[in-house]
Every structure is written in C-alpha cells, then in structure tokens.
Amino acid sequence: MRYIKNIQRIGLLLMLPLAFASCTDVWNGHYDVDNQKQVADKSLWEEIASRPELQGFAECLKQHGYDVMLDGDQVYTVFAPQGTMNIEGLSDQKVKDEVLENHIARFAHSANSATRDKDVLMLNEKLVTFTQSGEAYTFGDVALSERNIIAKNGVLHVISSQVPFFYNVWDYLTTSPSYSKICDFMYSFNEYELNEEASVKGPIVNGLQTYVDSVVEIRNELHYLLGMLNDEDSTYTMVLPTNKAWEAAYERIYPYYNFSTKNEERDSLQDLYTKLGIVNDLVFSHTVQVSPEDSLISTSENVFYNPFDYILSDFGSFDDAVVCSNGNVFVVDSLRYFPWDSWHETLKIEAEYTNTHVIKESTTNEYNRTIPFSDPLYSKVSKGSYLELVPAKSSSKTEVDFNVWDVLSASYDIKVVFLPQRLATDKSIGIKPNFIEASLSYIDAKGRTQSQKLAQAKDSLFVDPTRIDTVHVGTFQFPATTYGEETASIKLNVKFAGGSKTTNMSRTMLIDCVIFEPTKE
C-alpha cells in the first residue's frame, strides 16, 4: 500500500507567498539572526554531512534522495536530530513521510527573540511547535542543542533527538495491518495532482515545464464525503474497524446491494456500495456535536444515541480513545450498527415535487399547495407543502404514480402521509374520508418489471379526513436494489378505490409525502 503525504491545506498553501515575503525581509544575501549578519559557504546538505553527530540523519537523507534537495537553491529549515535514527520497521515511504519530512520545513525559521510558540509547517504537512523559554529552545518538545547554523540555502538547527511523528486520524489508518482493509479501500480514492502555483518552476525542457520544487496535492473523494481526516485544523472522532469487523460488516451489508442480473456492472457496484455502506457512519466531526456522551452525529448526518451503550459499547468514555493530532480513534472488532440507523435509511418522497410523481391527466388534476405559516399544521407538514389531487370529472378516480429512488434489496414498510380534508380547495365536498388502494411496480432479480398489489380493493384503506393520517399501505421485500440509478425504476401507485357512485367518500387526495421505512426485524 502506498502512503504518500497529503497537502490539502489550501489556506496554508495560499499563505506561503506571504511567509516567503516575511522571510526575505530578514534574508539579505544571507540570513540575519538577531541583527547579526552571517555569511555561509556551505549548503544545508554540506553542513549536515560535515557534522559527525548528524551522521545517522545524513545517511538517512542520502539514502532517500534528500541530499540533492538540500544541496539546491530552495530555502529550507532543517531540524537535524543527533544520534541514530529510529526507522526500524518503516517502509521507505514512511521514512520519508514520518521521519525526514517531519524534520524539514520550507523557508527560513530562526531561533531568536521573535520565537514564541510558533507552529512550523513541515514538508509532511504536520504543524510542529517551535518554542522559546528563556535562553532555551525546543522543537516539538525536543531541545535544540545548537541553533541558527546558517547555510547558503537555509537554516540548520541541531536537536537532541528525533521528533516523534504525531499521527492524525488519516495517518493512523496506515499504522497496523490489523485494519488494512479499510485503509486500502479509503486510500484507493487518492488522486495525485501537481499544484503548479505552489511549485517552483524550472526550465522548459522539450516544450514541457519542469519544476525544481514540486508540490503534489492529493484529492480524495472520501474526504469530501466523510470528512477531511488529513486536515490538522479539523477535529474528528472515528470508529475504526479491524479486518475482523470489516469482514463481518461486509458480509452483513452485501445482500442489501443485490443488483439485477440485467445490470452488467452488478458485481463491482455491489462491492463498491457495500464498502461505502461500511464507512458511511464511521466519522464524527467535533464541530457539530452538541452532547456527544448522549448522541453522536456522523458526517453523513445520521444520529447514534447513547454511543457508549451502542456503537462504542467496548469503551467507557472518550478518554479510552487513541489520541491523534486532529481527533481520536476507537478501534473496534465489531461494528454494532443497526441497518436502519445507517446504510438502510428511510426514504422520503416529497409528493409536491414535480419529478417525484406522474398523474393521468384524463382522470386527475394536480396542484402544488403550500401550508400558510399561520396554520397549526405548518410545522407538521414536510417542507410545508403538499400535493392536491382533484378528479378531472366528478366521476373520475384520482390516481398518481410516485417515483422512488435508491431502494435497497431489503424489506420496507411503505406509508403514505395524507393531510386533513379541510385543506381541500373545493369546500363543497365536505369532510369525507378517502378510500384508497395501492400497488407497486418494481424490478425483479432478473431485471424484469413486475407489479404487486399492496392495499387491494377488497381490503382498501380508509383515510381519516380530520387529521394528518400516515397510512401503512403495505410491506414489501425488494429482490433487487436500484441504488444509484438516475431514472426511478420503482413506482408506487395510489388511487381512489371507491365505485363510480360512491357519495360518502372524497375523491380529492391531499398527500404530503411517501415514506419507505426499513422493516425492523
């Protein structure tokens, strides 16, 4: 698995020109430390390589190609640790990201009277605090043994030991093979792009622009879906499943995304949506939590009540989490999520939206209505609006088809929310109940369109005309999912079920919304 640095902090990148300007104010030919101009004849690499106490660091730099970078024209500050480098067991990429680039920063950062708890942005995008206390200086709580060694291309500070790498939540995914499955999945979305504005241009070679110092940014769609887990300025709590938990969750969620055999991409889609279903509610931004001990709101906006009795039942409090630089992590061997709280969500179809329904104009006229703010029902009606269906003729049977998207191959309780008849435009009808039946058009496992009657004429449903009445029209197990489809394959038909001479029923239907609610078993 590749582990490559993230440079997502656009705000800081935009500040780099300003930072460079402030550095050049005191860089006049060579660096000016405490108003004492110094002239250097060595590059940073030459200075490091010449010092016996830095041989371990120098060997590590050379082995990974950083000697060339530190021997160039770009300005850097290096905090060079004395002694042997602690890199045992680390891959080459991790040595670069977690060790070498944890000790190198762009531009010049001197230790002088202006140093006061300064956060230095390192090459690996970590912020490390540079602090002065009296005559002493520390970098990430490690003492400086020697400071302000001026080189031709920057400043060198010698520090007493290696600065520990402090993982953020995104980094932490890479720390153990025990959770390699979620790590591999989430990192597979990485896309690498050159930030031309932040990079330093070199000569044009064969008609192509080259760069002497390139800044590569990583774009990951999951960061925008779940949270910027690599951002040091954000804070998150993450539930991190081990491979054991991942495999069990995969097996549990996989059947919910069973596409019909007619879909040529069914296998890859089922795999992708299953994995997205696993990660959908693992991340919780600290900025939106009101009372996290009582309830946690995921970045997908699902709410989990009493988290330490539920999804975090292996832990006693937030103090039991692994602390990261931008939040904390709970490693779990089991994902204790109820389907209806996470991937098997309730679907709500707003009746009044023009793309959610189709009428038969020969029998039905439609009107989109809005509840007046002064009406007591205003706060109880979804979106404050509803659909009024009126018979085209006095004897016509009103009828409507509702489009339903993103149905999983699972069981739903299907409900239609009706509003009281007092809202009907034609008051001459009086307050009479609706008498309805419902049927469903769906896709079977082979991709064929099938129909199923739910509330039939013999057991048609009465709708209470005096109140908001949520009518359960049926329960249905869908054999195939339509998740992600642009055109709705699922349609719910609702129509007046009375005879042509029915006089004690209202043919006008006032529908707020349709609800497909996961069946709780």
Image (cartoon, rainbow, N blue to C red):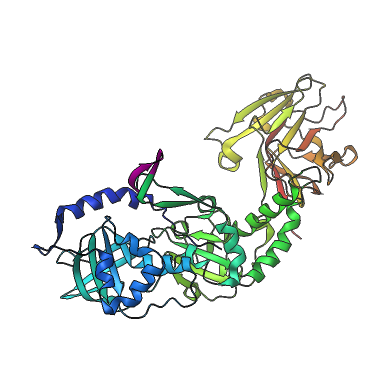
- Which quarter of the figure is the N terminus placed in? bottom right
Residue at left offset 84%, top offset 39%: 448
User: What x and y, as percent, mark residue 188?
Assistant: 57, 56
Left or right, 34 with reference to 174: left
Q: Is residue 133 above or below residue 29?
A: below
Predominant SS of the magenta segment: strand
User: What x and y, as percent, mark residue 507?
Assistant: 77, 28
- Which quarter of the figure is the C terminus placed in? bottom right
Magenta region, residue range:
199-209
Q: Nearer the viewer, residue 398 or 301?
A: 301
Left or right, 287 with reference to 406: left
Left or right, 286 with reference to 375: left
Q: Nearer the viewer, residue 346 or 186?
A: 186
- 206 is within the stretch colored magenta: yes
Residue at left offset 64%, top offset 59%: 278
Q: Nearer the viewer, residue 363 or 375?
A: 363
Asked whether the viewer can see residue 162, the reply is: no
Left or right, 312 with reference to 507: left
Q: Is residue 123 above or below residue 82?
A: above
Asked whether the viewer can see residue 396, the reply is: yes
Number of numbered labels in the structure image: 0
Residue at left offset 68%, top offset 64%: 249
